[in-house]
Image (cartoon, rainbow, N blue to C red):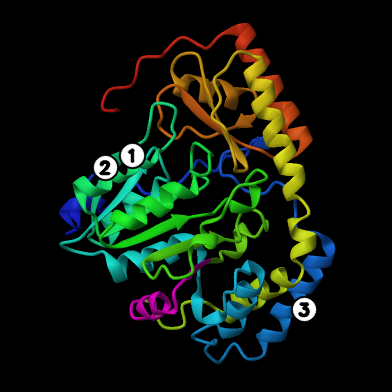
Amino acid sequence: MTRLEDLPIRDDLRGRSPYGAPQLDVPVRLNTNENSYPVPDEVVEAIGKAVAAELRDLNRYPDRDARALRADLAGYLGHGLTAEGVWAANGSNEIQQQLLQAFGGPGRSALGFTPAYSMHPLLALGTGTRWVPAHRSVDFGLTVDEAVSQVREHRPDVVFLCSPNNPTGTALDPAVIAAVLDVAPGMVIVDEAYAEFARLGTVSALAVLPGQPRLVVTRTMSKAFGFAGGRLGYLAADPAVVDAVQLVRLPYHLSALTQAAARAALAHRDALLDTVAAIMEQRDRIVTELRGRGLRVADSDANFVLYSVDGDQTLAWRAMLDHGVLVRDVGLPGWLRVTAGTPAETDAFLAAIDQIQRAGLPAPQPRPKGTR
């Protein structure tokens, strides 16, 4: 059997692992920031009708520019946006990949403030863009001075800002975005995948967008809309940015079925977004309960919580799994991330935390030879 190492793969891909969280069949899955609530029956029916209406014409290519969908997305975002300033693709990851294809690439660099979304450096790698890992404060915050000094030092062609940040959860002060825009020589991408969960008073980068042709705001329907299986991400930007990404997008990249399903979901946004307040309530409950148990917890504007553990986070992750709760080890020593879900899921998570705190973590086991 041929091994990957035997193929003439690019040198910079050798020895790497693909992105992905464990997909395990356990009672409580809180590791991928999905919306725990199923799609309501009325929306299931509407999406089914919309998709069915497209089936007869599947012999034809879809609308290459997804004009109707982009108009619907602009209507949802508001802020004076029109279809010309919105672009859609198969998840916000594809959106960001297209942006790097257009504005990054060989001989260019992209910078992000870590810890942050782990796909950003992988997208840079895939597009031949040099990745520059900048840094946050010890409390995971990012001040104007910290951001500006690092952007000035490295002068990247693309800057990634996450608001709310993944995996830490906290939204950015708009002053940081404005300051980075002032000093960045290239594009500034604000990843707002979790924007709908932000606490009251949090300002979206969409408010900064008018008159800023180098600013791009990316969003997704995977989280708040509970549309993760539908794979629909989008951006808002100056129309010239939309023209740029169309130079690199694949022909007919967004299927007719995806467009129809996303439009039906947007038409029923009130029913889908009705779960956001409930998820935020569980998020705040998790923060309060964990702090009450003596754990450090990062402030969160997202649908997840980053919390400290006593000892090795890999052992803590395994202990949670042994209690039937799957959380996420993001590779940050001493920390784990848990998605805020239903009240019952929060109950199970907190019960597991209590049992582990009473029993303590298992002793480290020697690693088999040949593993890291």
311 or 325: which is nearer to us?
311
Q: Does 259 sit left or right of 17 as displayed?
A: right
User: Where does the image place residue 328, in percent across and percent down from the top left?
Assistant: 52, 35
| Tag 3 secondary structure | helix
| Tag 2 secondary structure | helix
Q: Which residue is mark 1?
A: 145
Q: Which residue is mark 2?
A: 149
Residue 110's quadrant in the figure?
A: bottom left
Q: Which part of the image, by quadrant, shows the C terminus?
A: top left
243 or 308: which is nearer to us?
243
Please say whether residue 172 is visible from this viewpoint.
yes
Q: Which residue is mark 3?
A: 49
| Tag 1 secondary structure | helix
**Residue at the (36%, 66%) spot, across then down:** 214
**Residue at the (34%, 81%) spot, across then down:** 247
- 196 versus 25 height, above or below: below
How packed mark 3 is, by other alpha carbons closer than 10 Å (few <14, some 14-19, many 20 or more), is: some
Please say whether residue 27 is visible from this viewpoint.
no
- 220 versus 197 height, above or below: below
Between the C-alphas of marks 2 and 1, the distance is 6 Å
User: Where does the image place residue 92, in percent across and percent down from the top left?
Assistant: 49, 61
10 or 223: which is nearer to us?
223
Q: Amino acid at mark 1?
A: Asp
Residue 322's quadrant in the figure?
A: top right
- 266 versus 134 height, above or below: below
Residues at badges 2 and 1 in contact (C-beta under 8 Å)? yes
What mark, if any, has residue 320 been given in the picture? none
256 or 289: which is nearer to us?
289
First of labels 3, 1 by sequence position = 3
Q: Amino acid at mark 3?
A: Lys
Taking the view exactly as shown, the residue that stands out farthest to the right is 42
What are the residue bounds of the magenta stretch? 234-248
